[in-house]
Each structure stands twice: as structure tokens, then as C-alpha cells.
Image: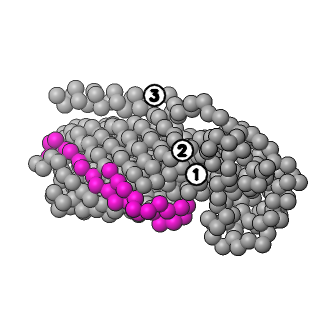
Amino acid sequence: MMNSSRTVACALLAALLSAAPVAQNHDHHDHKHEQGGADAMHQDHSDHADHDHSTPSDHTTEASNPTGNGDAHAVLTHTDDIHAALEKGGEPIVADVMGVVCDFCALAMNKIFSKREEIAAVYVDLDTKALNLVLVPGATLSDETIEELAVQAGYRVAAVRRGAQALGNAS
Amino acid sequence: MRGYLRLILLPSLFCSAVTARPVSYTGGWTIIEESDRQSSSALVHYTPAPSWSIGLRTEVNRDNDYAIYSVHPTLLAKRWFGKDYQGNLYFHGGIGVASGVYGNPLRDETAVYGGIMADWETRSLFAGYRSRYLDAGHFGDQFMHAARVGYAPYEGDSGDLHTWLMLEIDHRPAEEVPITATPLVRLFKGPLLLEVGYNLTVNQPLLNFTYRF
């Protein structure tokens, strides 16, 4: 009995050690790759200049979906760091992230994204399930790179918005 | 060799964490301490890729006076994403040395164990399951499984203190009292997770702690 149970346990362990890399659920999903114009973006920054940015959620709103399908998109959450980076002229980016339900999720993305030199400020908003980024002025970060970094953190990006759309001011 | 292994693993006894997210982000380290009605354990693991982690684990079985020092891989077999939820299926296991403690004269033995963990959670609801089969040679074999449900009375944002009220039911068929119930409180803030509970069936405390960095 003992030998057979040990055999079963060894088999389980061997299966675990030899298992293929994780098959995360990568069902097809829409990616929005809209690029906000620089002029519009800097206009948006000035719109926020006289606001109180003492709490992260002061400026968290959901903008109407331009497609008119009834969904709402998260817009940039303004923390002190986010606001300071915007003031310096960095590009704002908001990425909707699937499965963000706890502080460990937020911690993982903060750790992964804050290592990138292109990123001046990062904040994960659990209320809007969005990753908020502001780039270093002049820096670029592709949607594909953002998606790959999210995967490294263990999550999946559903949509990326930039510039005026990230700020909720797109017409 | 076994003495060297113990020397490496011993510091983990003085650290702590829980099985919330047993695989971290790429490059992340996690320290997990768990203490339940039968054993206390400490695990330090590193995540090379978001699909798996590898760690060193020490477990002391207080009922049977032996300790296990093991290498402990965990595989994230599947993660389900939703806008408002996340589900995970993990396989975990380990191989190492079982050794007598507290005066237990039995000679060292090879120990192997394996099992599954699964969880599903939103920001206010949690359900989880874990199982494990352990074979520690002449120290004995053991099967256990446990299910847990939880509710967060409020939804905290990033960096806030998150509070969960949970109930765990565990089943250990070989034990004198096979089924027990443990209500617990989970407190979660940034990289820290603390669980404090009390097994009402056998009057034993539960204390779990996780630190992720």
C-alpha cells in the first residue's frame, strides 16, 4: 500500500515538474489602439491644472464609449505622481486590465511597469480595473509592449487608450 | 547533505505568508507562512515566469513530530480572466527529506507530496479549494483537502486595507476528528497578507502570513 501510494505521489510530482508552461486564457479580445494627438493631450493637461489631486479617486470617472454601445471606459486616475508626470508633458495611457481584483494584482503590475525607464508614473486603480501610466516626455511605449508587460505580471490587457481618450476628453 | 539542506531551509521558519497567489509576477519573491491545526510551514518562492514558481519549503508536523524540508514547485495551469473576476488552477508539489523532531528517533526518509489548488474571486467574493497527498515514508502518509469561502464587507482600492471574512472547512480522513471548521479574518494591504483564525472544532489557532516583493 505504501509503495503504491508513493508511486502515485512520485508520478504526480513528475507530472508537475514536466508540465508545459501555463496555458493562460488568451481568448480573442478587442484591442483599441487609438492614439491621442499630442496637441490635444497637452490641452487636456492644462484642463486639469487647477484641480485638487490629493486623493487618487478625485478625478476617476468613466467616459462614454465613443462607439455608443453602452459600455463605459475608465479614464486616467490622478494621483500626485500621475499629475506631476502629466505636468511635465508625458503621454497619458490607460489600459483596461482583466482580472484585477486584489492588491497583489496591483502590486505585480506596479513592480513590472515601474521598472521601465519609459514610464514616469504608474497607478493601478482597482475601482476602474485600469492600469494608469504616464510616459517620460518624448518616450514611447507600444500597445504590444504594454500587453507583454501585463502578461509578465500575470494579467491581460483588454484595451489601451492614449492621449485625449485616456483623459476622457476625446470628442 | 541533509544537514546542509536544513541549514538552507531553516531561515524560512522565521519568515512568513498564505497560499493567496502561490505564483507571483515575473522576478517576484514571496514568503509564505502557514500554521493550522496540525502543522506549521514556511515557503520562500521565486517566480521566473508568470506560469510557475519554485521555492524552498519547511513544514513541521506537530502531531507526529517530524519535519519536511523540500523543494516546492507550483505550476499555474490555468488562469481565467474576466472584467470583474479571476480564477486560477494550480498544481503544487514537492520532494525532500522528512526528519524526526522533538526527540523523534526515526531515521530520515524521502518525502514527496502533490496536490491542486483552485480559486475564484471578485473584489468581494472568494471561493477556494486545495488538496494534498503526502508520503513521508515511515513517518506516514496523509491526504487532506480544504475548501474556503470569503466575503469582503467593503471594496478597498490599491494600497487600502482590504478585509475579508472567511470560513474554511478542512477534511483529513485519517485524523481522529476528520472534518473541522475555521472562521478567519484576512487582512490585506500592499505586499502584506495576514490571516488570523480559530479552529472551532479542535480549538487550534490558524495564523497565515504572506509577504511579496
Please tell me how crowded label 2 is: few (under 14), some (14-19), or many (20+) other residues with Cα within 10 Å: some
The residue identified by callout 3 is A18
Q: What residue is rendered at 85% in x and 59% in y?
A: A43
Instruction: Decide whether residue B71 is among the magenta residues.
Output: no
Residue type at mark 3: give it. Answer: Ser
Chain to which the residue tagged by mark 3 belongs: A
Report the side of A161 relative to B199 (left or right): right
Chain to which the residue tagged by mark 2 belongs: B
Residues shaded magenta:
B149-175
Residue type at mark 1: give it. Answer: Lys
Chain to which the residue tagged by mark 1 belongs: A
The answer for how far apart the CA atoms under marks 1 and 2 are is: 7 Å
Total marks in image:
3
In what element is the residue under mark 1? loop
The answer for how far apart the CA atoms under marks 1 and 3 are is: 34 Å
In what element is the residue under mark 3? helix
Inspect this view and state whether residue B29 appears. no
Residue B79 in percent (x, y) is at: 48, 38
Q: Quadrant of residue A132?
A: bottom right
Mark sitting on residue A129? 1
Residue B211 in percent (x, y) is at: 47, 59
Residue B8 in percent (x, y) is at: 43, 52
The residue identified by callout 2 is B83
Front residue of A161 and B58: A161
Inspect this view and state whether residue B115 appears. yes
Q: Earlier in the sequence, mark 1 or mark 3?
A: 3
Residue type at mark 2: give it. Answer: Lys
Residue A54 in percent (x, y) is at: 66, 73
Front residue of A77 and B158: A77
Give the foreground label among 1 and 3: 1
Asked if badge 1 and badge 2 are on a common chain, one would say no
Q: Are marks 1 and 2 in contact (CB under 8 Å)?
A: yes
